[in-house]
Image (tube, rainbow, N blue to C red):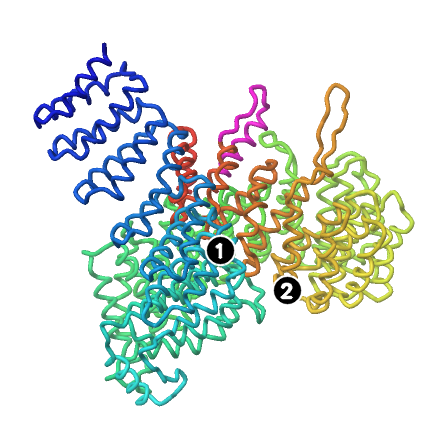
Amino acid sequence: MANLTITGILEKMTGKDKDFRYMATSDLLNELNKEGFKPDADLETKVSNIVLQQLDDAAGDVSGLAVKCLAPLAKKVNEQQVVDMTNKLCDKLLNGKEQHRDVASIALKTIISEVPTSSIAQSVLLSISPQLIKGITDPHASVRKKTVSCIASLASSLSDDLLAKATVEVVQLLKNRRTKTEMTRTNIQMIGALSRAVGYRFGPHLGDAVPILLNYCTSASENDEELREYSFQALESFLLRCPRDIYIYCDEILNLTLEYLSYDPNFTDNMDEDNGDESHEEEDDESANEYTDDEDISWKVRRAAAKCLAALIVSRPEMLSKLYEEACPKLIDRFKEREENVKMDVFNTFIELIRQTGNVTKGQTDISETSPRWLLKQEVPKIVRSITRQLREKSIKTKGCGFDFKPYVRPIYNAIMSRLTNQDQDQEVKECAISCMGHVVSTFGDNLKEELPSCLPVLVDRMGNEITRLTAVKAFAVIAASPLHIDLSCVLEHVIAELTAFLRKANRALRQATLGTLNSLIVAYGDKIGSTAYEVIITELSTLISDSDLHMTALALELCCTLMADRRSIQNVGLTVRNKVLPQALTLIRSSLLQGQALLALQSFFAALVYSANTSFDALLESLLSTAKPSPQSGGVTKQALYSIAQCVAVLCLAAGDQKCSATVKMLTDILKDDSGTNSAKQHLSLLCLGEIGRRKDLSSHAHIENIVIESFQSPFEEIKSAASYALGNIAVGNLSKYLPFILDQIDNQQKKQYLLLHSLKEVIVRQSVDKAEFQDSSVEKILSLLFNHCESEEEGVRNVVAECLGKIALIEPAKLVPALKERTTNRAAFTRATVVIAVKYSIVERPEKIDEIIYPEISSFLMLIKDHDRHVRRAAVLALSTAAHNKPNLIKGLLPELLPLLYDQTIVKQELIRTVDLGPFKHIVDDGLELRKAAFECVDTLLDGCLDQVNPSSFIVPYLKSGLDDHYDVKMPCHLILSKLADKCPSAVLAVLDSLVDPLQKTINFRPKQDAVKQEVDRNEDMIRSTLRAIASLNRISGGDCSLKFKNLMSEIAKSPTLWEKYCSIRNE
């Protein structure tokens, strides 16, 4: 019955009466929107044909209704029918009458947007693509332009086969030299648009496209500048979107861009950048500006070349050194460009070069003559000279007196003061005015003595405003640190009172800034501050001493030490410190978190207390030792706390003098003699204290102290044995000639104690390498013989201690150790080879050492063991490479071209390293290569910080990083960090392969642990999801990431999941 109704409607739709046709088309639209409408095959064809026919209806309202019919019709007819309709619409669009084309394009858009399934979508694409490509050769420029835009938009949805067909067809058209010039330009635009749309997927076609474009750049006639411009634009797109595959053409593209950066056939420029004749220079400037030619479009070629060069700089960080040698001089020379549009792009390209240099060399302290930063430094004079010429006005001559700053001090002051006193302005301007005035007073205060009485109260007033007080506090810190010793007498008392009150505020940044400013003020103006103010400050800062904020604690303790150093008010200050600060310090010292600057400040605090009047050394020592006793509230103290207590005891003893120090050492040794088996905690602390004191002072006057300590090696408690080993090594540091032979003799004769004795030896060697002391030659030979004998130990702990000892001795005796270590890189025993490589790792430290120049020519012998057949040796080489990249990147930069492929190979899962262990009821899979892969990825992460200019990120991301993102938990974590870092430093390389990275990321965030998973597994998975989301957030910050359909879908999936979206937002706002 329904089919009969439709047949009647179709007959009316073909009638002559316009109103009948409109009503019939409206009825058809209603029928098509009904859920139950299911036409047979014949009816589908009839309906489709008549609706398409109605699109050409002379009545606009009828054709408009027909377009609306297409949306429901596309969902109700079969797949082939949709494809047929699409083909017919394409034909109308390309070959129909002009007045029908707009309706046909709207109809085609309607069908495509309503295609219900991906299979139909692919069929439509398969049908529509050849039709669209025909539009590239259309004689009408507007059609060709729209075709390029349409195909580019469609490209990301094309399958690889369809993309290949479209690309091959365009490339074939480009190869045809008989093609009209305007058609060639369109084809070049099409190539560039395709690569921008599909990114890395276009890579396989570069071999065909790039040589053609390079040829067009060089062979195009002078009258066809647009052909060159479009060619450079396409090459720019290739560099940004296909960095991996374009690599082999980069040198050729660089040479071409540099050639056409100065391409100006209609203008001859004889300017000499280094010519000192200013009048000649100005004449050239005038003649340059006089030349105009409205028909000259060669500037477009220069601009396209500049942008192409910028793309090369952004996408190829490993070429930076080459770019500085070849491109930098050319760019500086082109600062004189006569066209403003081109000049801006030249400047922007140079800015990209500097920005990329910053990205690549960020954090590097070891700068060689091939480093981009060093090369940039060499160009600075020329850059400044060239930029100065650009800034120079012709009518102004620079006079020598222009460098005298005094005439400008008061105008600068007045300008800033007007802003400082103006309340009706933005918050940012207020803060900048305060900060700026602080620097002006600090720098020019001796020239502003009359103005200071009116300026300083305004700064104090800004301290009273909650919005500006932090900036004002920092400004006074700058003033207090001034070498001019600015007179603050008119505001000092008020400033101290305000700052003291700030120590009670909740704002952490304000309290930190206040502590620093108070310290600077007391150092500079302590003689003008009363002791009462000191006592109030000490009372307030005592509340800030806690392990919940160690940075704040360090600042508070440093301020307390500064206050105690003032001898005028030492009695009152000492009493307040003992009552208020000392209890807090004794609580702090029990914390397992105490370390770094806070621990050093605490040691200085106890040393300063000894000098305080009425502060008893014995009372302080008893208080310190008592903190190690277990308490009912917190139980026993941690190992870290015992080390902290021991260091403070040692500092206290040395500050008290020889007599007190000797008495303390005797007390500690008595504890070891009497309490050897009854009170392990007391014995533990005594050993650590002896070690810390012995490291700082010769204890040889205490007879047989070494034997007393070594007796503790017999203790049943591991922590006692470890403390005894530590103590023996540190006591030896205090008198090397006496105690080192004793340790070496014990290692020879006490086989069961060798591990502990090696740790003692390690303490000696580590301290000597830091303090630059020298062993006697006989001692060195004996130590080396002993250490090399233990290189093959089956115990990894022993091998690690041996390696560290060898590495630290190498810092002291590099000429002797480096050849000896190198000789053992070919040893038959794998453990020996691994040990000597780890030894090299320990010898590469951040500070400059004499070993650097000795190991530089030899380091390849160690690092090339990354090719060793034994995984332990390979891992050792990876760890050594990572340490070198972090501490001394210049040692390894020349080796990276050879090392990087070998390093990347270590990131691959190797089946030969995976074994199955039969545990009876079940089998357990053991991956022996996991630690090696983790170390390799962590090494790459380090290389990105120190050697980015040597790394080609495109060749690493796929397949190595992609594989790591789908690996074990321990491997994924560093891979996420690497991905985030690459997204920040090399966004174009990541963007080019973004689609391929989505799947492993999506798999990780969607993984759910088993129902019976333990809490540890659940927590690990949560950490993994957060790590993945952090990487995704970095990817989402890349400009142009929305070009990846898969990534957009991933972000949409995250947004739809409340749990994931909450975590993502939290991470994004960190």
Q: Identify the residue at image location x=56%, y=41%.
A: 587
Residue that mark 1 sits on: 208
Q: Identity of the amino acid at label 1?
A: Asp
Instruction: Label 2: state its secondary structure.
Output: helix
Residue furthest right in the image: 749
Residue 1025: in magenta span: yes
Residue 405 at x, y percent in the picture? 32, 79
Residue span colored magenta: 1006-1028
Image quarter hosting the N terminus: top left
Residue that mark 2 sits on: 894
Left or right, residue 601 beside residue 468? right
Q: Which one is nearer the viewer's eye here, 445 or 93?
A: 93
Q: Which one is nearer the viewer's eye here, 255 or 390?
A: 255
Left or right, residue 788 beside residue 585? right
Q: Identify the residue at image location x=62%, y=59%.
A: 887
Residue 218 at x, y percent in the picture? 42, 69
Left or right, residue 73 beside residue 742? left
Residue 121 at x, y percent in the picture? 37, 32
Residue 1067 at x, y percent in the picture? 43, 39
* Residue 958 image label: none
Q: Identify the residue at image location x=23%, y=20%.
A: 33
Cα separation, mark 2 vs mark 1, equals 33 Å
39 w.r.t. 791: above or below: above
Left or right, residue 844 beside residue 1041? right
Q: Is residue 526 visible?
A: no
